[in-house]
Image (cartoon, coloured by chain):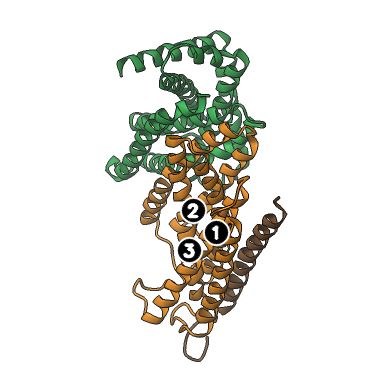
Chain colours: A orange, B green, C brown
Amino acid sequence: MTLQSRGRWITASGLLFLAAVYVRAIWFTPVERLQGGAQKIFYLHAPAAWSTLLAMGLVGVASILYLLMKDERFDRFAAASAEVGTAFACVMLTTGPLWAKPIWGTWWTWDARLTLTLFLFFLFIGYQLLRGAIAEPGTRARFSAVLGIFGMVLVPFIHLSVYLFRTLHPQPIVLKPSAPSLPDSMLLTLLLSFLAFTMLYVGFVTQRYALGGAQSHVG
Amino acid sequence: MGGLLRDAWVLARKDLALEVRTRTGIVSAVVFTALVLTVFNFGRDPTAVAVIDLAPSILWVTFTFAGVLSLNRAFQLELENQALEGLLVSPIDRRSLYLGKLCANLVFLLLVEAVGLPMFALFFNVAVLKVLLPLAGLIVLATVGFVAVGTLLSALVIRVRFAELMLPVLLLPFLIPPLIGAVQVTARLFSGRPLSEVVGWLKLLLAYDIVFVSLATLLFPATVDE
Amino acid sequence: MWADGTPPTGGYAIAAYLLTAIILLTYSFLLFRRGSKAP
């Protein structure tokens, strides 16, 4: 089976699994008392956050490995992960405000999560813009790797800055966000969703990676 | 290590000497700063918002604009003079190249800020002298971070089309931590809050500077090696 | 308010679920298509 087909299978399975998660989340998971139906957005938003951060982290790791070993497969992987990360960042940027509006009263809040997502999105876009602007593959790989590493190192700083800002400027809340300890059925839904999103990440990256290379035959 | 810094300083002096001789760079940056400050002034309704609320943001947005301008110019000069090729052929350690550029850009931007700050104090009637020392320290801290990342990113976009547009696009996410920190500390300084309140931010800025200068020094050779 | 006291915020959830599905399906579709066209 070629890498491309393998990727497709994983993606298709991921989508089916996500559909199952949808059903479970909407009809077979209890509604949270304080937030109402909107709390269910959490089952999509948190796993999307995980996928986005995973994508960025792996862009960074692949970039480091590329610079150390000059194996262009790492560069291909980084490019794939960046594109996939952009897609998941989009999911976060739509689910985030849709969750924020009923809970915090405004579409946008400069809280740590949303702000970080926004900047992850900009980083992914910038990374791909840079790649698109450099024609020579060797230069492109090297420069992207440098930017990728920088991006990965920036993430904790953004998180820290926003966290520091937020602790000094707490936001008024309209509805109280869910407590950290979830009842079992909700926890299971969340875990299943994480699994679905991880499958989708792997499937997407595999497909994108396969697209990025001349050869895609895997023994 | 000593050789690295010595070479860097030699390179920095060369760049700065060029700037001093032509003078257009620093003059245009200063004029630009004055223009931005003016626009900010006419953009607000003085009866609606007290200037002290906006002042920190105005100051740092102005510095950021001036900074991006300076960075673009710095590498533009390199391109025009084709000095980069000449340097690459020489046996100078690549990291000295970066540190030299960093030094030159830093001195240039600090100079612009040194002229911009009194202008800001004048235009917006802000009592800067009382907090001058901590404010100056903050400006240096934030500017180092800005120039560290900006200098490296300039090297990435130099051979790219639309470099002047690409640089801000790539750079701005990286400026968020130092900018937030700088604005927060400035606001507290202007309000007369004790320094102890801003220690957290200052530590963040310092960490940012150390991390990114080291990282950029480490990775710069990858941007110029063939 | 629903009868059991939970606020009627379900509309937001529906929108979020729909949009997420659209984004992920669109991206999947794009990848599938690019994969078919590649030599």
For this orientation, the residue located farthest to the front is A219
Q: Is residue B6 visible?
A: yes
Residue A55: give x, y in percent of width and height.
49, 53
A45 to the left or right of B69: left
Residue of label 3:
A198
As measured in the structure, the alpha-carbon distance from the residue carrying label 3 to the one carrying label 2 is 10 Å
Judging from the image, mark 3 belongs to the subunit labelled A
Label 2 element class: helix
Question: Image point 48% across, 59% down: which residue?
Answer: A51
Residue B37: give x, y in percent of width and height.
57, 33
As displayed, is residue B31 above or below residue B130? above
Q: Is residue B52 visible?
A: no
- Mark 2 Cα within 10 Å, few/some/many (few <14, many 20+)? many
Residue type indicated by callout 1:
Phe
Q: Dividing the picture into quarters, in which one does residue B21 lie? A: top right
Residue of label 2:
A55
Question: Image point 71% across, 50% down: which residue?
Answer: C39
- On-image quarter of the N terminus of chain A: bottom right
As measured in the structure, the alpha-carbon distance from the residue carrying label 2 to the one carrying label 1 is 9 Å
As displayed, is residue A31 above or below residue B98? below
Judge by depth and name the residue closer to the eye, A131 or A43: A131
As measured in the structure, the alpha-carbon distance from the residue carrying label 3 to the one carrying label 1 is 11 Å
As displayed, is residue C13 above or below residue A73? below
Q: Mark 1 and mark 2 in contact (Cβ < 8 Å)?
A: yes
Q: Mark 1 and mark 3 in contact (Cβ < 8 Å)?
A: no
Q: Nearer the viewer, mark 2 or mark 1?
A: 2
Q: How many marks?
A: 3
Residue of label 1:
A88
- Which of the marked residues, 2 or 1, is nearer the chain's N terminus? 2
